Image: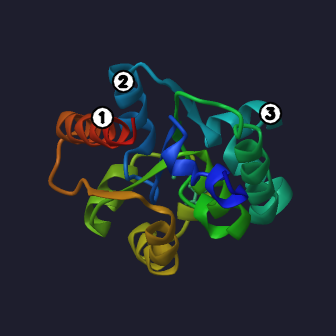
Amino acid sequence: MSAVNQVQPATQRSTNVVLVGLMGSGKSSVGRTVAEGLGLEFADTDAMIVEEAHRPITEIFADEGEDGFRRRETRALESLTQRQNLMLATGGGIILRERNRQLLRQLGFVVWLTASIDTLAYRVAQNRDRPLLHTEDPKQKLLDLMTTRQGFYEDVADLTVDTTDLTLPETVHGLVESINYHFACKS
Ligand code: S3P
């Protein structure tokens, strides 16, 4: 067998699922429920970072800047590269670094959860834990972030799910079906 044949694309051999998307897209809540349904272990890069830093994300941003937080995201992804049967929710900006985009693709089947800006703004309105949304106009900020990031999400995603008109159970159901189909096709 040639060296080229021996190296399969990661998406054809991994049993992991990775969720990417803007803040408010539902990565953590959807990911946790889908993981239960599929018998996958659940992990969340934000939670991993908070646990390692012993500080909330707002403090990490204040102490180390966004760059420091992004470096921590890379380390979190690197620590997972040998894992299997994992459902991984990620922070909304994880796709900004090229290294992270490589790692995300390598980790597994990548699903981009998206929604309209109005829907995202509504979903994040009650939560003060997101330093990038500590602005006068969080909805405009989400729009700016979507404009900057959309191409990166498209770049890493194997599947895109627009949850604007979906309830959580509908999103979970659709995702379980799609993931089962994806892994059945590979086996
Ligand atoms: C961020 C999203 C947050 C968190 C941090 C930065 C971003 O995660 O990683 O506040 O840059 O979009 P969620 O997308 O889970 O809210």
Quadrant placement of the C terminus: top left
Q: Secondary structure at mark 3?
A: helix
Q: Is residue 10 visible?
A: yes
Nearer the camera: disc 1 or disc 3: 1
Residue at which label 1 appears: 180
Residue visible at 53% across and 27% down in the picture: 85
Q: CA distance from mark 2 to mark 3?
A: 27 Å
Q: CA distance from mark 2 to mark 1?
A: 8 Å
Residue at which label 2 appears: 38
Q: Secondary structure at mark 2?
A: helix
Q: Label 1 sits on what residue type?
A: Asn
Q: Label 3 sits on what residue type?
A: Glu
Q: Secondary structure at mark 1?
A: helix
- The disc label shown at residue 52, or none: 3
CB under 8 Å between discs 2 and 1: yes
Residue visible at 17% across and 39% down in the picture: 170
Q: Is residue 54 visible?
A: no
| Image quadrant, ligand 1 | bottom right
CB under 8 Å between discs 1 and 3: no
